[in-house]
Image (cartoon, rainbow, N blue to C red):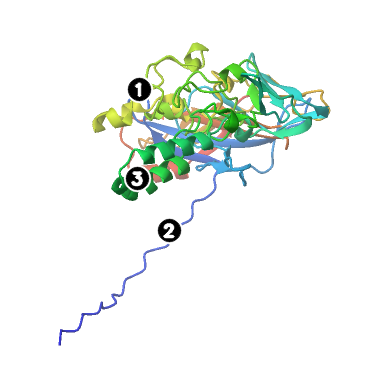
């Protein structure tokens, strides 16, 4: 008889100490390296309450910094869910991002509604539409008249973009017909899964939206729903409805993403060295032509870059959260913010940028007796027109003269204090 199979002998292990759960904090300290040298950075978040006609007031309870994006709780007819809130705990930032949350509102049923935000010497305008669909008039595409509406949430799912599932399935079928029976058996499921699950043919600027058409077959396109949130100066027209080729998306309308540009969307994803198919680094694009971005925002592709050069692919602007039209160099404390189309009364909302000028005080990272003070700059302001809440994120940095060892980092973090500067 064969020898019995040895059975494993249980080994007694000393249980490791429990890992403490991360503490939700409104301030954080980290080391960043974007300027060619190490810097110690402080990120601080404040919550305010505001009413139209008055400046925001500091709330008694704040919201912690967010290290993970928060999606909407539900998808919309198979689209999304997109992100409702983005990561805001970035230690290296430039400029001031303005993000708008809320709902387009009208005092009466309308087919379209003008939306606008005026801040920082700039006015950004959009349009909210009632439901519209693609129609056909002879040999030409047309758009139906909009249905009446009174409210529409500011979600990426209503902006221009999305995917064309009918065309995607046709592309899958075509790819499978070019395979031998054995190739279909082995690779067919993965091809179908890759195309239908990850949506590689979705609009790179907004994969959750409406109105993106890859294939102009009349029977497949008539009746499609059109975008309900658009950038006023760059709307979808019948002439721009159908792409000339599956990856010819660069000159399609730029969606206006009021609550922020997610990290997976173009051009932000290209700033991380992952330009989507259809865009070549350095090629012309509307974002550069309109002055939203510098021409060299994409530094290459991770797939064609040597490992030692990968850190150079990340553009500093990658960590900015705002739609490009709402990305400012600075938002002056106390300056006016006007919102149009976000109140049911139809009179508009007026508030201001918070006047706070917080200062971070930390023990000297080098071990000196005198503490180090960092003036914090507001790099992000989230204005919620529905709840009357604002969130401001401030950052400050200082160059490290020597590497910060773990023990020193713990010491500095424990001594972090937020002080009030002169308003």
Tell me, for residue 406, which label it has, or none. 3
Looking at the image, is 135 positioned above or below residue 23? Answer: above
**SS assignment at label 1:** loop
- Label 3 neighbour load within 10 Å: few <14, some 14-19, many 20+: few
Residue 278 in view here = yes
**Residue contact between numbered discs 2 and 1, judged by CB atoms under 8 Å:** no
Q: Position of residue 132 (x, y in %)?
A: 70, 28
Tell me, for residue 19, which label it has, or none. 2
**In the drawing, does residue 318 fall left or right of residue 350?**
left
Q: Quadrant of residue 115?
A: top right
Looking at the image, is 125 positioned above or below residue 322? Answer: above
Q: CA distance from mark 2 to mark 1?
A: 39 Å
Of the pair 192 and 408, the residue shown nearer to us: 192
| Sequence order check, earlier mark of 3 and 2 | 2
Residue occupying the point 64% across, 13% down: 121
**In the drawing, does residue 260 fall left or right of residue 340?**
left
**SS assignment at label 3:** helix
Mark nearest the camera among 3 and 2 is 2
| Sequence order check, earlier mark of 3 and 1 | 1
Residue 88 in view here = no
């Amino acid at each position: 008889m064969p020898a019995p199979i040895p059975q494993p002998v249980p080994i007694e292990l000393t249980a490791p100490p429990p890992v403490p759960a991360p503490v939700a904090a409104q301030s954080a300290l980290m080391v960043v390296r974007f300027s060619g040298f190490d810097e110690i950075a402080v990120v601080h978040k404040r919550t305010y309450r505001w009413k139209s006609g008055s400046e925001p007031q500091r709330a008694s309870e704040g919201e912690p910094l967010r290290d993970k994006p928060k999606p909407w709780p539900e998808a919309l007819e198979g689209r999304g869910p997109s992100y409702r809130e983005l990561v805001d705990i970035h230690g290296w930032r430039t400029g001031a991002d303005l993000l708008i949350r809320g709902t387009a509102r009208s005092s009466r049923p309308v087919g379209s509604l003008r939306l606008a935000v005026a801040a920082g010497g700039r006015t950004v305008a959009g349009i909210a539409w009632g439901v519209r669909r693609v129609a056909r008039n002879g040999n030409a595409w047309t758009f139906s008249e909009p249905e009446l509406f009174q409210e529409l949430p500011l979600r990426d799912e209503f902006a221009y973009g999305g995917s064309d599932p009918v065309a995607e399935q046709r592309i899958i079928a075509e790819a499978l017909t070019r395979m031998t029976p054995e190739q279909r058996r082995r690779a067919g499921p993965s091809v179908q899964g890759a195309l239908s699950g990850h949506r590689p043919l979705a609009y790179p600027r907004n994969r959750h939206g409406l109105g993106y058409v890859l294939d102009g077959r009349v029977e497949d396109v008539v009746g499609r729903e059109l975008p309900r949130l658009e950038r006023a100066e760059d709307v979808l027209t019948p002439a721009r409805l159908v792409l000339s080729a599956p990856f010819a998306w660069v000159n399609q309308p730029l969606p206006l993403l009021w609550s922020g540009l997610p990290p997976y969307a173009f051009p932000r994803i290209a700033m991380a060295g992952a330009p989507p198919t259809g865009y070549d680094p350095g090629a012309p694009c509307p974002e550069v032509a309109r002055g939203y971005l510098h021409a060299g925002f994409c530094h290459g592709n991770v797939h064609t870059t040597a490992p030692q050069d990968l850190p150079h692919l990340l553009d500093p602007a990658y960590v900015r959260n705002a739609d490009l039209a709402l990305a400012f160099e600075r938002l002056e404390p106390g300056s006016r913010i006007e919102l149009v189309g976000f109140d049911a009364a139809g009179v508009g909302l007026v508030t201001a940028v918070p006047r706070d000028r917080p200062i971070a005080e930390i023990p000297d990272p080098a071990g000196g007796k005198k503490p180090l003070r960092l003036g914090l700059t507001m790099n992000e302001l989230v204005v919620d027109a529905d709840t009357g809440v604002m969130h401001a994120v401030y950052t400050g940095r200082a160059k490290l003269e020597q590497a910060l060892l773990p023990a020193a980092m713990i010491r500095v973090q424990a001594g972090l204090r937020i002080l009030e500067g002169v308003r």
